[in-house]
């Protein structure tokens, strides 16, 4: 009997990437899409006139504030319902007590009240900050404080927490908001600023980095072993700053092999 031949059918699969096969990470795709939309929106906004940009930024800030205020209002609803509402024109109520009562009601209102208050506060802040940045060409603590003053004053007027003297309360609230915002701005600058490079340890940092010993930079600084002391280093000096024997040998060998440091060491003998 003849021996049959079994054919082999090869089916080529289309070249599918991991993204096309499983759809990729949906969270990363969503983040990338949001970043793309945000970049496009900012580019479009930068081309608009000042009134248009200020109006859009104010509306966006107010929307975000309304959402935050509405969420907070859902948690303070029970508190606001427990605060008594005095009858209008109550003769025996102290004006100062009435002002305190209105402040408590303003800070513990329901979702709609809080949404309104926060919408005004964040919208005015964002709008003034946008105008100040466009006019002054920079975003600094002065612009931030001006925007905070306006938002604080408007919050006081809209929420009704100022009592009988609305103007004085608006100014007081504006100043309070401005001081808080200015302090937070300065604090943010302090922690977000990149660390300044220590000019006295540039060569030392490079030497240690080349040897993979950058963890010992703090030992050099603790012993005040600056760049100018590199040609003078010996095993005793490195031992005094608690550098182990192995790294000590590597550092001294590198200094001996470096032409510039070797020349300086020879001239100082």
Image (cartoon, rainbow, N blue to C red):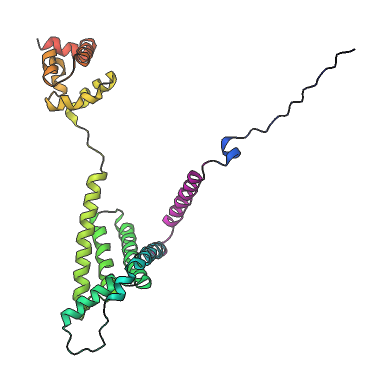
Which of the two residues, 112 or 140, is positioned nearer the viewer here? 112
Q: Work out whether 170 lies above or below 13.
A: below
Q: Is residue 22 left or right of residue 219?
A: right
Q: Is residue 30 magenta?
A: yes
From the image, which quarter does the N terminus lie in? Answer: top right
Question: What is the total number of numbered labels drawn onto the structure image?
Answer: 0
Which of the two residues, 127 or 47, is positioned nearer the viewer here? 127
Image position, residue 9 (x, y; %): 77, 25
> Quadrant of residue 205 in the image?
top left
Q: Is residue 121 left or right of residue 162?
A: right
Q: Which residues are magenta?
A: 24-52
Image position, residue 13 (x, y; %): 68, 32
Q: Residue at x 16, y 24 (%)?
A: 220
Image position, residue 130 (x, y; %): 34, 60
- The dominant secondary structure in magenta is helix
> Quadrant of residue 161 in the image?
bottom left
Q: Work out whether 67 lies above or below 194.
A: below
Q: Can residue 76 be seen by looking at this rendering?
A: yes
Q: Can residue 158 be seen by looking at this rendering?
A: no
Q: Is residue 221 magenta?
A: no
From the image, which quarter does the C terminus lie in? Answer: top left
Which of the two residues, 114 or 143, is positioned nearer the viewer here? 114
> Quadrant of residue 264 in the image?
top left
């Amino acid at each position: 009997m003849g021996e049959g031949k079994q054919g082999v059918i090869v089916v080529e699969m289309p070249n599918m990437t991991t993204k096309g096969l499983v759809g990729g990470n949906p969270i990363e795709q969503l983040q990338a899409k949001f970043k793309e939309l945000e970049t496009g929106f900012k580019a479009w906004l930068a081309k608009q006139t000042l009134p248009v940009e200020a109006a859009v930024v104010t509306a966006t800030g107010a929307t975000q504030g309304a959402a935050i205020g509405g969420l907070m209002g859902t948690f303070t609803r029970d508190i606001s319902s427990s605060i008594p509402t005095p009858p209008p024109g109550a003769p025996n109520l102290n004006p100062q007590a009435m002002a305190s009562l209105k402040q408590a009601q303003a800070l513990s209102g329901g979702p709609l009240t809080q949404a309104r208050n926060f919408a005004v506060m964040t919208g005015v802040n964002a709008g003034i900050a946008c105008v100040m940045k466009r006019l002054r060409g920079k975003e600094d603590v002065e612009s931030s404080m001006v925007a905070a003053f306006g938002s604080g004053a408007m919050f006081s007027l809209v929420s009704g927490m100022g009592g009988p003297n609305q103007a004085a309360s608006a100014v007081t609230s504006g100043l309070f908001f401005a001081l808080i915002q200015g302090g937070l701005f300065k604090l943010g600058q302090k922690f977000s600023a990149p660390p300044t490079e220590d000019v006295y340890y540039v060569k030392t940092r490079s030497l240690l980095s080349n040897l993979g010993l950058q963890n010992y930079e703090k030992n050099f600084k603790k012993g005040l072993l600056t760049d100018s002391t590199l040609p003078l280093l010996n095993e005793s000096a490195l031992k005094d700053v608690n550098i182990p024997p192995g790294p000590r040998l590597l550092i001294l060998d590198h200094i001996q092999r470096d032409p510039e440091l070797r020349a300086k060491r020879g001239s100082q003998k």
